[in-house]
Image: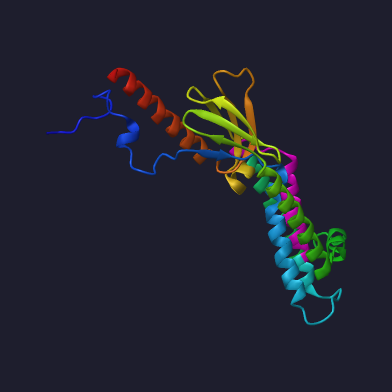
């Protein structure tokens, strides 16, 4: 005898047919500040500090390896600052950005390989030899590490928890709690920056509770797509269960 589907039998709950563990009982949402997107600079600074610390001889202006490391650090820092300063909402803007980077990189390589083309520009590029020792990179890494530590400690005292029947806001050092009704919760997802989505799969979540006039806006939520899909599936399972119980009565 074929098994009846949830659509054919209203007394069958979706939570009973779904595999165990597929729909979680709660979802945590944390809104991070934009400095979280500076982690590529943090990693580059850490690698540069390790490399410079491994040098057996004192830093010399003629050390090409140290110059290359400094240029790479500045390049990563510049790209990261551009990401923090501007929004790239569409793929076309992302393509334009990479096109500009490719053109600039090609011009630098061209002037390096063919210095006779434009001697003035070649002279400027030859004079551009940034240098930084291991102490600088370790100090930069330590500053970012301290900021990240404080940031992760602060967000532990300000986060949202979505449950099947309620929305909880945990905030404050004394664990203050605000409860909102969640069965009719409306969720909107926005991805306003392609780069930020690439770095942490982050975006904006807008939560609108049925009994609240104001919308709850959470920016820079990591893995926003997975969070939104999980919450939608969890609330959808609750609505099917409520309809099933009402039909059974």
Q: Compared with residue 32, is residue 119 higher up or lower down, i.e. above or below? A: below
Q: Which residues lie in the magenta part?
A: 70-92
Residue at the limit of the structure toward the front, as seen here: 174
Q: Nearer the viewer, residue 92 or 242?
A: 242
On-image quarter of the N terminus: top left
When the figure is inspected, residue 139 is found, relative to residue 50, above or below; the finding is: above
Viewer-proximal residue among 150 and 48: 150
Query: Is 84 inside the magenta-drawn segment?
Result: yes
SS assignment for the magenta stretch, majority? helix
Is residue 207 found left or right of 9 in the rendered image?
A: right
- Magenta-drawn stretch contains 128: no
Q: Residue furthest bottom?
A: 56
Query: Which of the two residues, 54 or 93, is positioned nearer the viewer here?
Result: 54
Give the percent coordinates (x, y) of residue 224.
Answer: 55, 39
Residue found at x 69% / y 48%? 153
Give x and y (percent) for residue 35. Answer: 72, 46
Judging depth in this view, the residue of 121 and 202 nearest the camera is: 202
The residue drawn where x is 48% and y is 34% is 231
Q: How many labels were placed on the picture?
A: 0
Q: Is residue 205 visible?
A: yes
Quadrant in which the C terminus appears: top left
- Picture coordinates of residue 26 (x, y %)? 49, 38
Q: Is residue 49 above or below residue 226?
A: below
- Quarter of the rendering containing residue 173: top right
The quadrant where residue 16 appears: top left
């Amino acid at each position: 005898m074929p098994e009846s589907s949830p659509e054919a039998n209203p007394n069958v709950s979706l939570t009973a047919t779904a595999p165990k563990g597929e729909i979680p009982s709660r979802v945590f949402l944390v809104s991070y500040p934009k400095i979280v997107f500076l982690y590529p600079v943090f990693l580059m600074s850490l690698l540069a500090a390790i490399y410079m610390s491994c040098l057996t001889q004192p830093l010399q202006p003629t050390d090409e390896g140290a110059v290359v490391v400094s240029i790479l650090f500045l390049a990563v820092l510049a790209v990261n600052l551009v990401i923090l300063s501007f929004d790239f909402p569409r793929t076309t803007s992302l393509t334009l950005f990479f096109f500009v980077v490719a053109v600039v990189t090609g011009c630098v390589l061209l002037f390096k390989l063919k210095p006779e083309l434009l001697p003035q520009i070649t002279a400027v590029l030859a004079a551009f030899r940034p240098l930084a020792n291991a102490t600088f990179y370790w100090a930069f890494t330590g500053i970012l590490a301290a900021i990240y530590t404080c940031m992760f400690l602060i967000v532990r005292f300000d986060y949202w928890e979505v449950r099947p029947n309620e929305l909880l806001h945990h905030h404050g050092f004394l664990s203050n709690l605000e409860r909102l009704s969640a069965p009719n919760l409306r969720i909107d997802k926005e991805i306003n920056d392609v780069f930020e989505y690439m770095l942490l799969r982050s975006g904006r979540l807008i939560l609108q509770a049925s009994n609240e006039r104001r919308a709850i806006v959470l920016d820079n939520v990591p893995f926003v797509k997975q969070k939104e899909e999980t919450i939608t599936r969890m609330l959808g399972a609750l609505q099917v269960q409520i309809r099933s119980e009402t039909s059974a009565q």
